[in-house]
Image (spheres, grey):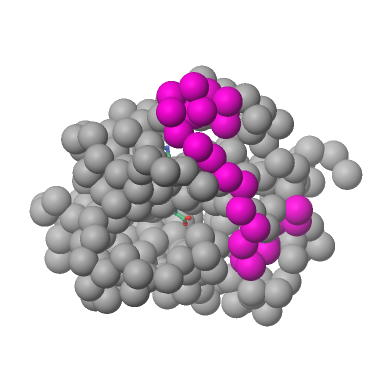
Amino acid sequence: MGSSDRYAIDDVAFVGRTVGEYEAMFDLDLSSWAGEPVLDCPGGACAFVAGANARGLDAVGADLLYDVPPDELRAKCRRDVDTAIAGFDGVEDQFVWEFYDGVPDVRDHWTTAYRQFAADYADHYDTDRYVQAQLPDLPFDDDSFSLVLSAHLLFLYVDKLDHEFHEASLLELARVAREEVRVYPLARFDGKRYPRLDELRATLADAGYATEVRPVSFEFLREAPEMLVVEVSSGAF
Ligand SMILES: C[S@@+](CC[C@H](N)C(=O)[O-])C[C@H]1O[C@@H](n2cnc3c(N)ncnc32)[C@H](O)[C@@H]1O
């Protein structure tokens, strides 16, 4: 199979997941973070911030596009879900169909997510809940968030984002966290694990952070049912 047959989209898609997808991919028990400040970066069109706040967390989203007005961003969500879903055509067998029943189920999840996101973003985009930010620089103080989540940017878009970007971004996510950073997935779109993960873990270790590659139950990209956990608080694993 040639590279043009791979699941591919022209740009980094502004799509998002439901709270249930995040709970599975980050092995997350939301109740154990109640009352805690939590960052989702990049938040994209995720329902996580809306849903987590509704369940008592103090959740904040940061994304490159959180300076786009709500109506415009909602229209982009709709277009990008269509584009991302079209990307599955002919390559469905590269994915594991356990969490989702099939491509229409993926569309249902991502549509539910962006609608919840868009409603919450319209209500809160001019507050501190949704913050425009561009990794590898975040506009937050050190140790601002108990937990930092980062999905579907690092490791996935290796064709667009170089190793130095990954290194600087992971150190930045760790800087603003005071307990843990969780990153999912660790694989590229072709299902192969990011090739220089060990080097990144060594860089994090040099900076004083223990890391663990932890299996998770959410498997969609083949060979990628695992997340990277960066332990920020003292007393590592
Ligand atoms: C595929 S979405 C992932 C969203 C969400 N985390 C999820 O798992 O569904 C990728 C997001 O990364 C954002 N993005 C791209 N480059 C970024 C950067 N340098 N800093 C912050 N966000 C960025 C895009 O705007 C987009 O919302």
Check the image and report above or below for 155 versus 185. above
Image quadrant, ligand 1 = top left
Q: Nearer the viewer, residue 64 or 83?
A: 64
What's the residue at 65%, 58% (across, down)?
Answer: 215
Instruction: Say if residue 66 shows up in the picture.
Output: no
- Is residue 69 magenta-colored? no
Residue 63 placement, left or right of 94? left
Q: For the magenta stretch, what is the residue range?
A: 200-223
Query: In the rendering, at what x and y percent does residue 69 appear?
Result: 20, 51
Query: In the rendering, at what x and y percent does residue 34 appear?
Result: 26, 69
Q: Nearer the viewer, residue 31 or 138?
A: 31
Residue 45 placement, left or right of 17? left
Q: Quadrant of the N terminus?
A: top right
Residue most extreme to the left: 127
- Is residue 210 magenta-colored? yes
How many numbered marks are there?
0
Residue most extreme to the right: 1
What's the residue at 51%, 47% (across, down)?
Answer: 237
In which quadrant of the rendered view does residue 133 lie? top left
Query: In the rendering, at what x and y percent does residue 207 appear?
Result: 43, 24
Q: Nearer the viewer, residue 213 or 148?
A: 213
Check the image and report above or below for 217 versus 198. below
What's the residue at 49%, 22% (across, down)?
Answer: 206
Residue 12 placement, left or right of 58? right
Q: Nearer the viewer, residue 162 or 83?
A: 162
Instruction: Say if residue 213 shows up in the picture.
Output: yes
What's the residue at 32%, 33% (across, down)?
Answer: 175
